[in-house]
Amino acid sequence: MRGRAVAWLATAVLVGACATSAGSTPASATPASDAPASAAPAPSSSPEAVQLTVFAAASLSDVLAKVKPAYEAAHPGTTLTISTDSSAALETQIEQGAPADVFLSADTTNPKKLVDAGMSAGEAVAFAGNKLTIVAPSDGTKVSAPQDLAKPGLRIIAAGDAVPITSYATQLVGNLAKLAGYPADFAAAYAANVSSKEDNVKAVIGKIELGEGDAAIVYVTDAAASTKVRTIDVPDAANVPASYAGVVVGASKHQEPARTFLGWLTSPDGQALFQQLGFLAPAG
């Protein structure tokens, strides 16, 4: 009888142990559904830092000083480094391998040189216009009308032959020579009065501000930015429209951001800044 009781008890213990194993979870185990999932890294919301090097005509110095903070604020992560000089000098530097992402010229000729040479990423884009005026020292009395540019002994400050302002000025002088009231030798007399040729238009107006010249032909925007010169308007019939064009440099390592910047210059936000400083809308 005692043997039967022992056998029964052993059987009960074995059955209870099996039930425990099947119906409960050991304390050391964690159900798969409760295990912490491995979190995937969140995508970064910070834009990639890009530094764009912009080679620009000297006459764009003032407006680009406003463009830089406005563009950088609208495009976080992008920094503009701006270098200004004569458009012709900058185009030559790019041809020689100077690192630039965008080239902004005071004409269409220099950007076209890069396009024709296969050194651009796409076609040139017109982004602004300008006109010409005559400047003289604020306290000068030798020039009061465009005709005075032909006075013997006048000191005219000009730019180098390859600088865009020189090409525009030559056209302007030729147009003035055709108007009534101008001497037949007006163009020749003007050329004879050129006393120096500067590297760029900013250097030209700088000499007039210092009183080192009696007159110069410059862009309307440069004249308006100076408090040390007075302007002598030229007849609308003779004035020459200046067209500014830009291009993305083919060797740029940031061509897409460069295209974005060039496109922004023609946008309402970009054009508003140009118009504040007296530039005209791009032709066409």
Image (spheres, helix red, strand yellow):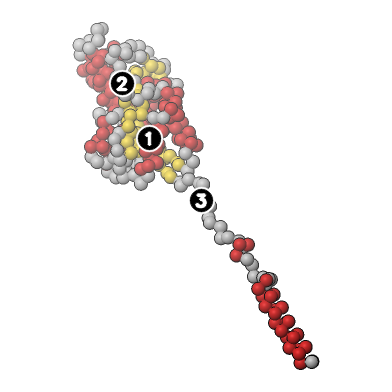
Of all residues, the one furthest to the front in this rendering is 1
Q: x%, y% of residue 164? A: 29, 28
Residue in the image at 20% along x and 13% along y = 185
The residues bearing labels 2 and 1 have C-alpha atoms spaced at a distance of 21 Å
In the image, what residue type sits under mark 3?
Pro
Mark 1 residue element: helix
Q: Which residue is mark 3?
A: 43
The residues bearing labels 3 and 1 have C-alpha atoms spaced at a distance of 29 Å
What number is the disc on residue 262? 1
What number is the disc on residue 241? 2
Badge 3 density bin: few <14, some 14–19, many ≥20, Cα 10 Å: few
Badge 1 density bin: few <14, some 14–19, many ≥20, Cα 10 Å: many
Residue in the image at 50% along x and 37% along y = 73
Q: Depth-wise, is mark 2 or mark 1 nearer the camera?
A: 1
Q: Is residue 155 left or right of residue 78?
A: left
Q: x%, y% of residue 21? A: 66, 75
In the image, what residue type sits under mark 2?
Pro
| Residue 198 image-quadrant placement | top left
* N-term mark: 3 or 2: 3
Mark 2 residue element: loop
Q: Nearer the viewer, residue 26 or 208?
A: 26
Residue in the image at 27% along x and 41% along y = 119
Q: Is residue 14 left or right of residue 44?
A: right
Mark 3 residue element: loop
Q: Depth-wise, is mark 3 or mark 2 nearer the camera?
A: 3
Image quadrant containing the N terminus? bottom right
| Residue 242 image-quadrant placement | top left
